[in-house]
Amino acid sequence: MKRKLARKIKEGAIETTLFLSALSSVFITISIVVVLAYESFGFFKEVSIKEFFTGTQWTPLFANPKFGILPLISGTLLTTSIALIVALPLGLTVTVYLSEYAPHRVREVIKPILELLAAVPTVVYGYFALLFLTPILQKFIPDLSGFNALSPGIIMGIMIIPYVSSVSEDAMKAVPMHIREGSYAMGATKLQTAFKVVIPSAFSGIAAAFIIGISRAIGETMVVAIAAGGMPNLTANPLEPVQTLTAYIVQVSLGDAPHGTVEYKTIFAAGITLFFMTLGFNILGFWLRKRIREVY
Amino acid sequence: MQKSKSELQTEIKKRIAVIKFWDRVFLIIGLLSTLVGLVLLFTLMADLFVNGFPRLSYKFLSSFPSRFPEEAGILSAWAGSFLVLLVTALASIPLGIAAGIYLEEYARKNWLTDIIEINIANLAGVPSIVYGLLALGLFVYFFKFGESILTGGLALALLILPMVIMATREAIRAIPNSIREASYALGATKWQTVQSHIIPYSTGGILTGVIIGLSRAIGETAPIITVGALTFIAFLPTSPFSSEFPFISFKWLFDPFTVMPIQMFNWVSRPQQEFQLNAAAAGIVLMIMTLLMNGLAIYIRYRFRRKIKW
């Protein structure tokens, strides 16, 4: 009896420990929200929400500070759009090629190499965008300034291909074989089957993949911090320097922003904006991804 | 006017030829698109190598940063990276594996489990710099750990925790139920089953995930900048070993630090070309570390996949 009891207590203790470990992830989320909300609350006591979301100038470090977040948001959306323009056709083609065309052997070799693209430290990509890609682009586009949105955008687009293609490949694999076979039996080529049968069937999964990619690009920091410049700039021109939400946080963190000052609080205000932007895309992506499983 | 049979036949043949032609064109486009990524990777490495290789030397690895580019090195950076990674590994591996085991083996299907699962998926999508802000508010100013190695390591641990949990779950999920049933049939308790079967059989998968997570951590720059790592450090952290009792010191946990990617970032952002060459050299070291870790992970995955046959 006694041994049984001791065993029961031990099992219970272990289960509780494991449970608490799993629960810790929930506390991480809660503390992210609490920390961001707490520090931004202090910020919004000094700056009105209206000024924050409608102001078109972001100069918190100047003598006459202005706190309009729009230039940072526009910078973030500009680099993200460029990344998406690169990643969308390229990622989709790569996925279709790998999942419908490539022989098994080729896929086994190419996939791990492609995944290395996601493993390269982003600071290395930043170096590459600033010192390799920008000078090359400047030869074709003389108006391009040394810091610009175009070059980091292109690099980010290629960088997110592995994320995009692995999720959308899952979605395309989930399309049952007999649906493809039906199409082949009608005499369709692989291309027709891929674009008229498989992609429409896997649409929500592929959309989810791109939304996850967008969220990656929005949160990407070092590439834009190095190569896009450090000037908040309300523009849609990819040839000009811009600053993103993430790059602003880096800029302030590198300087000296003492705890409790408005400059210190601005990075949390920018952070909470960033957090909710990515959260929105993540939830949308999560929801779309769940729909794949419901179809079949 | 009705078309003759032969006319119709040639028209159909023509159409088939066109369709087949586009099919082949797409094959080439697909191959080229796939190559774009590979070419970028190759160019990037070649560019780093051409610029940085002449700067690589024993002196570069064993010198502190300096105002003079030709004397500057990465000693404090790689020492910092190593210690930060140590903290990250010690914090994230036990926690992540425990959470993964709970979710796969113990969790009942209820609302709490659902919340934990959705939450982990969500955490994986949070931008890394947000973890930096969390660490700044929580570890630096609330727990008063300061802008230290401990803070940096914990920030990265939180960042890779979702990856470790997901890798653990995937590895455990691959173990067939018959193994568990055999263990229970012999009267083993749940923990005995986990300890003697689940953990050993999932080690390969877990290890792969952990190494890939750590290789992400070593290249992360943004959260470490946010917690206030310095960009110019000309000293090493306190040695963990001391000559007096108790011989081991934990003072290094609270020392200021810098890491490899920050050192590289610092050099990239300087206008002088000599420093940018240093950045390329630091980039080579960083890339070699990342590629070695990823290669190791691929090798482990491959070996365990071959060894275990259910």
Image: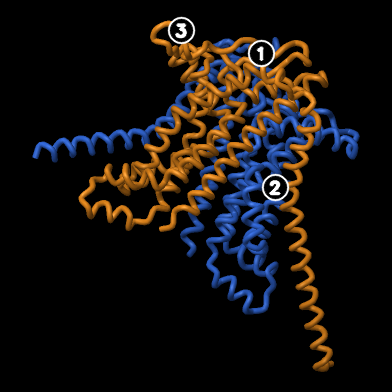
Chain colours: A blue, B orange
- The alpha-carbon separation of the residues under discs 1 and 2 comes to 37 Å
Q: Which residue type does callout 2 highlight? A: Ala
Q: Is residue A180 toward the left or the right of residue B6 in the image?
A: left
Task: Please state the chain letter of the residue tagged with numbered disc 3 in the rendered image.
Answer: B
Is tag 1's residue or tag 3's residue first in the polypeptide sequence?
Answer: 1
Task: Return the mark for residue B243.
Answer: 3
Q: Amino acid at mark 1?
A: Phe
The circle on residue A87 is 2
Residue B27, horizontal then vertical, whole percent: 74, 63
Callout in the foreground (1, 3): 3
Question: For mark 3, does the 10 Å Cα neighbourhood hold few (<14), some (14 to 19), or many (20 or more) residues?
Answer: few
Let me know if marks 2 and 3 both belong to one chain: no
Q: Is residue B268 visible?
A: no
Residue type indicated by callout 3: Ser
Quarter where residue B129 is shown: top right
Q: Secondary structure at mark 2?
A: helix
CA gap between label 1 and label 3 equals 29 Å
Camera-side residue: B39 or A258?
B39
Mark 3, secondary structure of its residue: loop
Residue at 55% in and 64% down: A175
Q: Which residue is mark 1?
A: B232
Which residue does the image show at 68% across and 15% down from the upper left? B63
Q: Are marks 1 and 2 on the same chain?
A: no
Mark in front: 2 vs 3: 3
**Disc 1 secondary structure class:** loop
